[in-house]
Amino acid sequence: MEQPAAELAEPFTFVVGMDGVLRLAPRRSERVSCADGDTLLNAGEVSFTREAGRWTVSKVSNQSTGYCPDVTS
C-alpha cells in the first residue's frame, strides 16, 4: 500500500515481539494495537530516509509511553 509523503516523513511506531519480529505502524497508531497484545522485547519509534533508491533507518528511539522500555533496550 502506497503511503502519503507526509506520513513517510514522520517516525513510525515499532514493536519487537518475543519472536524477534519487527512490526511497524503509522506514528499515530497505538503500540498496543501494533503489538497485537503480545509481550514485547522493545518498542519505540523509527525514522527512515531514502538513499540510493532504497529505504534506510536514520533514527531509532525507545520512546514509548505505553510500554516504557528500559533505556538499555
Image (tube, helix red, strand yellow):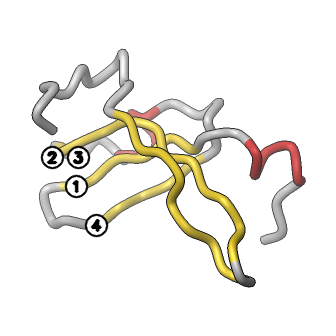
Q: CA distance from mark 4 to mark 3?
A: 11 Å
Whole-angstrom CA distance, mark 3 to mark 2, is 10 Å
Label 4, secondary structure: give it: loop
Residues at circles 2 and 1 in contact by the CB criterion of under 8 Å: yes
Which circle's residue, 2 or 1, is located before the other in the chain? 1
Disc 1 marks a residue whose amino acid type is Gly
Write the residue at 50% across / 60% down.
57
Of pointers 4 and 2, the one earlier in the residue sequence? 4
**Residue 18, above or below 36:** below
- Front of the two marks 3 and 2: 2
- Helix, strand or loop for disc 2: strand
Vertical order, 35 against 32 (above or below): below
Disc 3 to disc 1: CB gap under 8 Å: yes
Q: Amino acid at mark 2?
A: Leu
Which labelled disc corresponds to residue 17?
A: 1
**Whole-percent x and y of residue 20?**
19, 65
Q: Which residue is mark 4?
A: 21
Q: Residue 68: image x %, image y %?
A: 24, 20
